[in-house]
Structures are given as structure tokens and as C-alpha cells.
Image: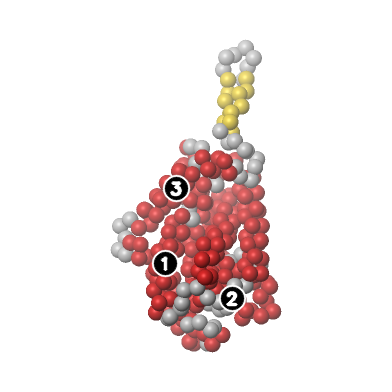
Amino acid sequence: MSSAITDLDASSPRREVVLRPEGAGRLFDAAELWRYRDLLWRLGLRDIQVRYKQTLLGAGWAVVQPVVMMVVFSLVFGRMLGVATNVKAPYPIFVYAGLLPWTFFTAAVSASSLSLVSNAGMLRKIYFPRLLMPLSAMLAPLADLLIAFVVLGGMMLWYGVDLNWGLMLLPAAVASVVLAAAGVGTLLAALTVSYRDIKHVIPFLIQVWLFVTPVIYPLDLADQWAWLLGLNPMAGPISAFRAMVLGNAIDVWAWMQSIVVSLAVLGLALWMFARSERRFADVV
């Protein structure tokens, strides 16, 4: 935190002290974020505790949503609509491997987009890097993702999916999903402060986004539209994540294409966030 002292009157000892964050005007200050890393952790831990406090299933809720959606999609799309015929692996584990990163993405984007509005009291009273809010909101969904991996391991044993070297790349696939969620969530968080009706658009946006993301169908099924799906920041990571789990060939081009799009979205989000940050405490 830096300060600038302005004399109100040359003959008066009174002075006005204006506090400004270090690095004001930058997209973000990595050094400042690192100094506040303990606050980032505590905010994320608070969200995790609130999520599972006084719940019936506790951490079990982390696997309920992807498991239920897997069952529904397997019945509707796998059997009734015949999508399973275009999939070489057992369709339930094919869908579940796509739902894990997708469920994290949707939960992280929803939480991040509302993080500033939900913590308006903190924004008005104390200074801290505002970017911590949307970033910390992703920690609880990330914890859910780790818990849901237990079910994925059980399904791999049930369907006889062997361990493969591709599993070692799963952290990279998860990191690319986190990158996509950080960009979209931060962008929506900045917009939601000024335009409150954005929060009503987010659920609809996520529903539409699901069907243009290869969660319930393979990426190569899109055929000539595959390049267009590559502009979806979640298409490549989900396809790569699934390939790692099932031991299939990874579509590196689609994955890298999605990462480039995610970086572009994150850059736009940080630019908009930096432009709007000064007004957050006034309009939130």
C-alpha cells in the first residue's frame, strides 16, 4: 500500500492522506497477491466450511451432482439417442470423466461471478486485492473435484479401465480448466458489480454452454465443426482430461487452442477488472 500526502491549506497543519494500492493501474500485482495468500486460503476455507456445515451428506454432496447427471445422460443420450454407439469406452465412465471438469467449471464460475457482490461488506470496510475474491471462490469447487475423483477411481476399477501414463498429465488438464474458470469467473465478477442482472444470465449461459462442450459426446463427433468447438475454452481440456482417464490419444491441438482462448479471456477479464476495481466499493 502506498500513500500520497496532499496539503489542504498552506497555512494549516491539516493534511489529507490518500491511500492507493501498490501497482494501481496494472492488470494485477503478483507480489501483492502473494503477500495476501493467507487471506486467499482463509476465504476459500470459509467457503468450504459453510458449504458442508449442517449438511446431511457432508462431503458426499460433491459427488451427488456428477453421479446423478451421469445416470441421466447415460439413459437419455447413451441409450435413447444412441450417442454411446459413437463412443469406444463404456458410456457411463465416458460421461463421468467429462462431467468432473465440467462440474468444477460451472461451480467455480457461478461462485466467482457472485463473489464480489456476496462480500460487499468486506469491500467497503477494508483494503485487500479485490482479485482475491473471485480466485478464492474457486477453492471450494476444487475441493469438490478432488473428492469426486474417488468415484472416478471406483468406476475405473468397475469397468476395467487400466492405469496408464496419461494419468500423470491430469494435473495439467485440471490446471487448464482452472485457467478457463478463472478467466470467465473474473470477467463475470467485474460485470456483475455494475450490472446485477448478469447473475440471472449466468445459469442460462451455463446450460447452453454444456451442449456446445464435448461432455456427452466425443469431440471428433463434431466433424467439420470441431475447429469451432476448439474456440470453446472448455472443449480441449475436457477432451484431454477424458483421454487421459481412458488411455486414449490426446488431441493436443484442440487442447492448446482452448488454452490460448482461455488466456485471451483471462487477459480481457483482468483488464476489465482493473478498470472497474476503483468503483467496486461505491457501487457494490
Label annotation for residue 148? 1
Residue 283: x and y, percent?
55, 44
Residue nearest the viewer, comparing 75 with 122: 75
Indicate the quadrant where residue 202 lies: bottom right
Find numbered disc 2 in the image and state the secondary structure of the residue it sits on.
loop
Q: CA distance from mark 2 to mark 1?
A: 24 Å
Coloration of the structure image: secondary structure
Q: Which residue is identified by label 3? A: 41
**Alpha-carbon distance for marks 2 and 3?**
36 Å
Residue 217 position in % (x across, y down): 56, 78
Q: Is residue 279 left or right of residue 77?
A: right
Mark 2 residue type: Ala
Type of amino acid at the residue the image marks with label 1: Ala
Decide which of 78, 201 is in the foreground and name it: 78
Upstream in sequence: badge 3 or badge 1: 3
Nearest-to-viewer mark from 2 and 1: 2
Which residue bears the numbered disc 2?
A: 249
Identify whether 217 is placed above or below 11: below
Name the residue at 51% across, 47% down: 132
Q: Which mark is drawn over residue 42?
A: none
| Residue 200 locus on image (x, y percent) | 53, 61
